[in-house]
Image: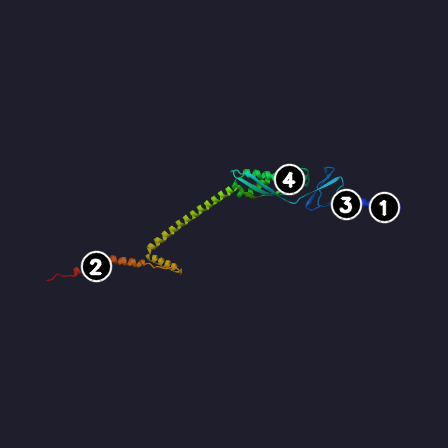
Amino acid sequence: MLEELLTAAVSVGAAGTVYLVAAARVVKQYERGVVFRLGRLHGDARPPGFTLVVPGVDRLHKVNLQIVTMPVPAQEGITRDNVTVRVDAVVYFKVVDAAAAIVNVESYRFAVSQMAQTSLRSIIGKSDLDDLLSNREKLNQGLELMIDSPAIGWGVQIDRVEIKDVSLPDTMKRSMARQAEADRERRARVINADAELQASRKLAEAAQQMAETPSALQLRLLQTIVAVAAEKNSTLVLPFPVELLRFLERAAQQTPHEHEVEARGEAGGRTPGP
């Protein structure tokens, strides 16, 4: 009799152990467990940790709540200013309602991917090329709103959307390069012309100042000679001093006048003879 009781106890214990092993489930910290009992949603999502389900009756679906990084394949489209471009992006999203992500949509990852591609094509058609190249923050916000609206019903929250790259045709790249080069050349010419204008004004002021003090011109000449003489491999030819030329010019102008004065003095100094 005792042996039968022990055998029954062992059998019950073994059956309980098998049942416990079959019913035991572990939900990780970044997951939530959605239980379906006979095909119907049963209760709220199971929190992280150890949980039990009815074997053969319940089915536990684990949903990952981590942020998912999903690349959007490059989409080719025509911008509003009739330029063909290829644009790719990346979407960051996470599940906030595990039950809705399982019940309301067949595959929330595939749904988000398709919505992101469609929204990206729509953004390309509504934007200019300059916006795609320089105003990406505004386009990223527009993409995020377009994807987030339907994703709310799927239990998914869009964290952010980023446009990664904008590929242009080779002909457009060459045209933009020529335009940029022409613009840089135009600005260089304007800067050079402005510099020449400022230099000419300063030279005019310097010439006016030197005209008032002629000796400054000679000092400037000597400074130029010193600067040129600093080069050891240069041959310096010293010009005739300008001041000496002016001295000789003044002497040549005064000589006939002085001779005439002396002649008049001599003539006035003579007295007629008796």
Q: What is the residue that sits farthest to the right in this orientation?
A: 1
Q: Tell me, what colour scheme is on the image?
A: rainbow
- Residue at image x 19%, y 59%? 263
Residues at marks 4 and 1, CA–CA distance in whole angstroms? 54 Å
User: Which residue is more in the foreground, 244 or 165?
Assistant: 165
Residues at marks 4 and 3, CA–CA distance in whole angstroms? 34 Å
User: Which residue is more in the foreground, 10 or 156?
Assistant: 10
Q: Does residue 158 appear left or right of residue 238 in this picture?
A: right
Where residue 55 is drawn, which disc sits there?
A: none
Q: Which residue is mark 3?
A: 21
Q: What is the residue that sits farthest to the bottom in this orientation?
A: 274
Identify the amino acid type marked 4: Phe
Where residue 110 is drawn, which disc sits there?
A: 4
Where residue 7 is drawn, which disc sits there?
A: 1
Mark 2: few/some/many CA within 10 Å (<14, 14-19, 20+): few
User: Which residue is more in the foreground, 84 or 162?
Assistant: 84
Mark 2 vs 3, N-terminal side: 3
Identify the amino acid type marked 3: Val
Quadrant assignment for the C terminus:
bottom left
Residues at marks 2 and 3, CA–CA distance in whole angstroms? 141 Å
Q: Which residue is mark 2?
A: 259
Measured as percent of width and height from the top left, residue 268 is found at 16, 59
Q: Nearer the viewer, mark 2 or mark 3?
A: 3
Helix, strand or loop status at disc 4:
helix
Residues at marks 4 and 2, CA–CA distance in whole angstroms? 116 Å
